[in-house]
Image (cartoon, grey):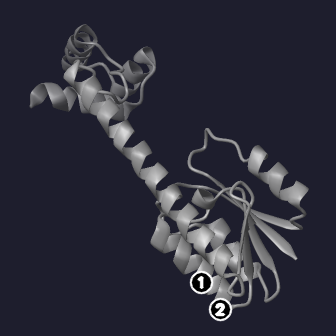
Amino acid sequence: MKVGYARVSTGLQNLDLQKDSLSKFGCSEIFTDHISGAKAHRAGLESALHYLRGGDTLVVWRLDRLGRNVEDLISIVNKLNDRKISFHSLQENITMDKTSSTGQLMFHLFAAFAEFERNLIIERTEAGRVAARARGRLGGRPEKLKNKDVELITTLISNGAPIKTIAEQWQVSRTTIYRYINKTKA
């Protein structure tokens, strides 16, 4: 039996491409996660691993969907092999089991490339953040209230206006009002 596993890192990404490819390949069950591959606990992967039986094949769309790094990929595949479960990656077209030394070699090479690619993405992202900071862009969420709003809110509070009413007027939470007021006191 072929069992699929699909993962995307964020809620903004979509699993459809991976799920369609896994179904087309003949996976009867597909387990999914919406979580970063850097996280150790992935409920969908754990469910898939628990579901698999000897003679089954775990199928992923790409190697980087399965493991956090080379060591993690190798560890997962070795545990599968110990349970007599094969592994297949669609994009790299690798089938891995203990009987195929070529499959093992290709798996290790592609796993190293997948980790290298992930590290390059992390480096480029950080370089972009540094460049943006150097140009005065700090990132993060924009401020909800401007300085003149905070001054007016402070005046309203000192005149006895209820926080709830002020929050409704500016369409923010009471917590936001308190946070801005505490900032001005500091």
Q: Nearer the viewer, residue 77 or 113?
A: 113
Residue ranking furthest to the left: 186
Height in image: 2 above or below 54? above
**Secondary element type, mark 2:** helix
Q: Which residue is mark 2?
A: 82
Quarter of the N terminus within the rendering: bottom right
| Of residues 152 and 129, the one drawn nearer to the viewer in this rendering | 129
Q: At x 80% / y 70%, what residue is drawn?
A: 3
Distance CA(mark 1)–CA(mark 2): 6 Å
Q: Is residue 124 above or below residue 24?
A: above
Which quarter of the image is occupied by the C terminus? top left
Question: Based on the displayed image, in which of its 4 quarters is residue 54 positioned?
Answer: bottom right
Please give the label number shown on residue 111: none
Question: Residue at left 46%, top 73%?
Answer: 71
Question: x%, y% of residue 173?
Answer: 41, 30
Left or right? Give the position of 6 relative to 43: right
Q: Nearer the viewer, residue 125 or 106?
A: 106
Q: Is residue 19 left or right of residue 169?
A: right
Give the SS element for disc 1: helix
Q: Which amino acid, by three-letter code, is at mark 2?
A: Asp
The numbered mark at residue 78 is 1
Q: Is residue 47 above or below residue 164?
A: below
Q: In front: 100, or 170?
A: 100
Identity, as a three-letter code, of the amino acid under mark 1: Asn
In percent of width and height, residue 99 lies at 72, 87
| Percent position of residue 161, x then y | 30, 19
With 7 as the anchor, is 157 left or right in this view?
Answer: left
Determine the residue located farthest toward the front in the rendered image.
Answer: 102
Label 1–label 2 contact, CB within 8 A: yes
Mark 1, Cα crowd under 10 Å, few <14 / some 14-19 / many 20+, is some
Residue 114 sits above or below residue 17 on the image: below
Residue 101 drawn at (x, y percent) = 65, 81
